[in-house]
Image (spheres, helix red, strand yellow):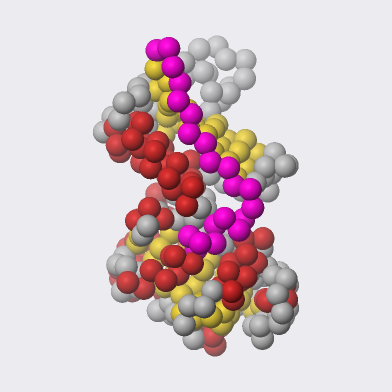
C-alpha cells in the first residue's frame, strides 16, 4: 500500500482526498496537515470512522512522523510552493491540486524536483472530463482562428483565471503555433465604458472568469468562424469527480521524473 499524507486535510477538497485514500485498497492514510481543525481525527472530519490520524499543523514534522511516500496538497496558492519544497526535502513525492501557480512557480518546482531527485505531479484539474475538454479544444484550435474561454467558479476561489483555463489556453496556443485572432482589440484604447470587460487573454484567446455563489467549477471553450460557433463545456457537479484522477496520480507519481504537469500525461 502507498503511504499518503494529505496537506489541507480540513478543507473541502482535502476531506474528499482523505475519503478517497481511505477507501482505496492500494493507498493508506498515514498523515494529515492543516492550520485548521488541528488535533481532530482526519477520518472523522471527512465523515468516516476514526482512522487514528490526527490533523497536525507542522508539515515537516508530520512528514517525518508519518513515513509518507506521497503527499497530496490541496492547500492555498500562497503556501503551495513552500509545501512542495518541504516535501522534496523529506524525499516525499508531491501530488498537487492547488491552483494559482504561475509559470515561474512551475519552473522553480521543476528545478527543485530535479535537484532533489524526487518526482512532482501537478494538475490544474483532476477531472477526467476536464482533461478530455482540453484535448478536444486542442484539436479545434488547429482549425478555428478565434476562441474565448469562460470559466465559472464558486466565490471563494482565490485565483483568476483558473488553473484549468490557464492550462487550456496554453495548450490551445501550442497546438496552433500562433496566437488566435482576438476580436475587439484593446478595449481601453477603444473607448470602453467598462475597462477590462473583454477579459484577459493568453495567446490571443480571451478568458472571462466568473466568481459567484452557486457554482462549483465549470468551463466553456467557444470557437468561432464565419457563420458558425462550436462550444465545448465541462461541468463539475461534486468534488467527488476529482478523486479518480487524484488516486491515479498518487499511484503514478513515484515512477515519473522531474515535474509532470497535467493529468493528460498519465491517462
Nearer to me, 88 or 220: 220
Decide: is 262 above or below 8: above
Q: Which residues are magenta?
A: 226-246
Q: Position of residue 22 (x, y in %)?
A: 59, 76
Q: Is residue 141 left or right of residue 30?
A: left
Please check the rendered image and state whether residue 50 is part of the magenta-colored stretch, yes or no: no
Decide: is 117 above or below 232: below
Q: Is residue 80 visible?
A: no
Q: Residue at x 26, y 33 (%)?
A: 177
Q: Is residue 211 left or right of residue 103?
A: right
Q: Position of residue 236 (x, y in %)?
A: 59, 47
Counting the numbered discs, the total is: 0
Q: Position of residue 61 (x, y in %)?
A: 55, 83
Decide: is 80 above or below 150: below
Please check the rendered image and state whether residue 243 is part of the magenta-colored stretch, yes or no: yes
- Classify the position of the C terminus by image quarter: bottom left
Q: Residue at x 53, y 44 (%)?
A: 162
Amino acid at each position: 500500500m502507498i503511504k499518503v499524507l494529505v496537506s489541507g486535510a480540513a478543507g473541502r477538497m482535502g476531506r474528499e482526498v482523505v475519503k478517497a485514500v481511505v477507501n482505496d485498497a492500494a493507498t493508506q492514510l498515514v498523515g494529515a496537515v492543516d492550520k485548521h481543525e488541528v488535533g481532530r481525527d482526519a477520518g472523522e472530519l471527512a465523515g468516516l470512522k476514526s482512522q487514528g490520524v490526527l490533523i497536525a499543523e507542522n508539515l515537516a514534522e508530520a512528514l517525518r512522523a508519518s513515513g509518507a511516500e506521497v503527499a497530496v496538497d490541496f492547500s492555498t496558492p500562497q503556501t503551495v510552493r513552500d509545501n512542495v519544497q518541504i516535501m522534496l526535502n523529506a524525499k516525499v513525492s508531491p501530488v498537487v491540486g492547488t491552483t494559482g501557480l504561475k509559470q515561474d512557480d512551475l519552473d522553480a518546482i521543476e528545478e527543485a524536483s530535479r535537484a532533489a531527485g524526487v518526482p512532482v505531479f501537478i494538475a490544474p484539474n483532476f477531472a477526467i472530463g476536464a482533461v478530455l475538454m482540453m484535448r478536444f479544444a486542442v484539436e479545434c484550435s488547429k482549425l478555428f482562428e478565434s476562441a474565448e474561454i469562460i470559466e465559472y467558479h464558486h466565490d471563494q476561489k482565490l485565483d483568476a483565471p483558473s488553473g484549468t483555463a490557464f492550462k487550456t489556453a496554453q495548450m490551445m496556443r501550442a497546438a496552433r503555433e500562433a496566437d488566435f485572432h482576438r476580436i475587439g482589440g484593446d478595449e481601453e484604447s477603444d473607448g470602453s465604458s467598462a475597462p477590462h470587460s473583454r477579459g484577459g487573454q493568453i495567446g490571443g484567446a480571451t478568458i472571462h472568469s466568473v466568481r459567484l455563489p452557486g457554482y462549483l467549477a465549470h468551463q466553456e471553450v467557444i470557437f468561432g468562424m464565419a457563420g458558425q460557433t462550436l462550444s465545448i463545456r465541462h461541468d463539475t457537479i461534486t468534488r467527488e469527480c476529482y478523486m479518480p484522477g487524484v488516486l491515479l496520480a498518487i499511484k503514478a507519481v513515484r515512477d515519473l521524473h522531474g515535474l509532470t504537469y497535467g493529468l493528460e500525461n498519465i491517462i
